[in-house]
Amino acid sequence: MDVPLHFAVKTRLVDLLERLGEGAALPPERTLAAEFGVSRWTMRQAIRELVADGRLRARQGQGTFVATPKLIQPLALVSYTEALRAQGHEPAREVVAFEEVDADAELADGLGVAVGAPVHRLERVLFADGQPIGLEITYLAVERFPTLRAVLRPTGSLYRCLTDELGVRFGEGEEVVETVIASPREAELLQATQSMPMFLLHRRSRDVDGRPIEVVRSLYRGDRVAFRATLRP
Amino acid sequence: MDVPLHFAVKTRLVDLLERLGEGAALPPERTLAAEFGVSRWTMRQAIRELVADGRLRARQGQGTFVATPKLIQPLALVSYTEALRAQGHEPAREVVAFEEVDADAELADGLGVAVGAPVHRLERVLFADGQPIGLEITYLAVERFPTLRAVLRPTGSLYRCLTDELGVRFGEGEEVVETVIASPREAELLQATQSMPMFLLHRRSRDVDGRPIEVVRSLYRGDRVAFRATLRP
DNA sequence: AAGTGGTCTAGACCACTCC
DNA sequence: GAGTGGTCTAGACCACTTG
C-alpha cells in the first residue's frame, strides 16, 4: 500500500464525479463504501477532502453532489457588491450584529483611537447567488463615524455608504490572508460543514491622507471562494 | 451536547498549549484521550485541527509540539530570498526537477507561445530556516530564455537571475489564491501531514512592456505560512 | 418512517523514531 | 523493543431532510 487508501479512493471518486455532470448526486456514502470495498470512515475521509477542495458539496439529509467552480474575488479596496456584480453574480448581505464595543489594544492600534474608545462592530454574512460564502466583521471608530448607524442601510454596501455619503476617499490598505479551520458557530453561519478549511483575512485600510478607516476580519469558505491579487514589483 | 465533542476538546487543548510554552511537547494522544475521557479518534480530530491552524506540530515517532507563529510572505513580484531575509529568516531552495516540457493550452496562453512549444519547468521546494514551507513550479518559454539552463544556479534566486543576468524588468502580475488539500506526493515533499489545507497560488507575470515572463504554480503549507497583500482602490 | 450525512467509540495494525 | 503518531475497520447513535 503505497499511498493511503483514502487517497486512492479520492482519485477514483474524481473519475466518477467527472463522468457525472455538475450538480449531479453521488450515491450514498454507505453504498460507495461497499462498492469500493472500504469502510465508511475511509470513504468519508475521501469525500471530506473533495468537499474541502470544492469539488463536492455534502448536504445532511439530502446527499452529496458535484459542486460548481469556485468564485474568484478581488483582493482590493473595492465594494463587495460591485465586484460580484461585475462577474455576473448576485450579491446579498445579512446583518448578524451591529453594535458598539470598546476598542482593545489591537483595534485601537488599527483604528488610531485610544484603548477603550467606542467602536462600531458590524458583523454580516455575505451571500453570492443566494449562498453564504463569507462572514465579515468590520470595525470603525465611532469618533470618526458618529452618524454611521443613522446613515447605513444594513443590507446596502458599506463602501458605497462611506464614499458617497460620508465623503471617505480610500487610499491604501493591507490584507493578511491565512487558512484556518472554521469553528462550529462560523460553520453554522456560513451553512458549511464543520472543520472545513477557510480563509481568514485581516484588513486595515486608510484614506488618501493616511488616516485609518476600518479594521476588518473576514472569514471566507475555502471550498467556494478564491482570491485574485494584482502583483507589483 | 451543543457543539461537537472534538471541538470542546480542541478548546481545552488550546488552554493547555497556551500554558505550555512554544516548542513544548504535549502528552501522547492516547494519554490525552484517556485524561479527557474521549476516544482517540476524537482527540486526533481536535489535534488535527490545531495542526491545520498552525498551533501544533505533529511528528511521527516523536510527539506533538506547540508550534511557532506563521511566516508572513508578501504577495508581490519580489524575490523569495530577499523577502524572507527582510524578515530575518534564512531562505533556501532545493531543485526537485528542471526539465523541458511541451506547452499545453493553458501554459501557451500564459506564456504567449504556441501550444506544444518548449517550456522550462523548474520545480523547487522552498525552505525557511531549514523547514520546507512551499513547493514552486515555474514555467518559462525556452524561446524567450534559451540560456536559462546555463545561467541559473539552481540554488540561487530565479528573480535575481532574470533581472540581473537576463535583463528582465518585471511589470505587473496577477495571482489567484485558493485553498486545497495536499496530495501525498506534495505532503511528502513538504514534510507535512497528509490531507492538510494548503495554499495553491497561480501566478502570471509580465515585464514592463506587457510581455509574459512566467507562469507559476505554488503550493504553500497553510499551517506555516500567511500572505500579505497591499490593497488599492 | 426511511434514508441521508455527522459524530463517536473501541480496537487493531502500520510506520517511524529513539534508546 | 518500546513508544509515538498515522491509517483503517465495524458498528453505533444522532440530526436532518424528504416522502
Image (cartoon, coloured by chain):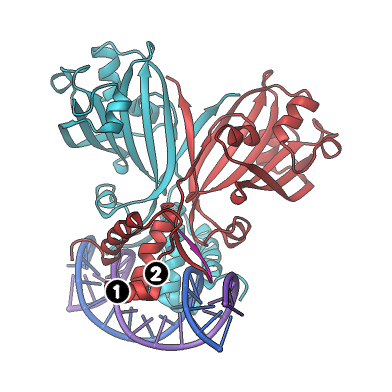
Chain colours: A red, B cyan, C blue, D purple
Please identify the dominant SS of the magenta region: strand
Q: Is residue B149 above or below residue B23?
A: above
Q: Which mark is residue A35?
A: 1
Report the span colored magenta.
A57-61
Per the image, label 2 sits on a secondary structure element best described as: loop
**Disc 1 and disc 2 in contact, CB within 8 angstroms:** yes
Residue B199 in sight here: yes
In the rendered image, residue B224 lying in the magenta stretch gets the answer: no
The residue depicted at 84 percent of the width and 35 percent of the height is: A151
Which chain's residue wears label 2? A
Q: Which mark is residue A170?
A: none
- The image shows residue A84 at horizontal and vertical percentages of 59, 37
Q: Is residue A157 left or right of residue B60?
A: right
Mark nearer the N terminus (1 vs 2): 2
Residue at the image point whose x is 48% and y is 49% from the top: A222
Residue under the image location 38 percent in, 24 percent down:
B78
Please tell me which residue is depicted at 22% across the width and 30% down the height of the picture: B103
The 10 Å Cα crowd at callout 2, few under 14, some 14 to 19, many 20 or more, is few
B52 lies above or below B124:
below
- The front one of B83 and A1 is A1
Q: Which mark is residue A27?
A: 2
Q: CA distance from mark 1 to mark 2?
A: 10 Å
User: As drawn, is B36 to the left or to the right of A113?
Assistant: left
Residue A116 visible in the shown view: no
| Kind of residue indicated by mark 2 | Pro
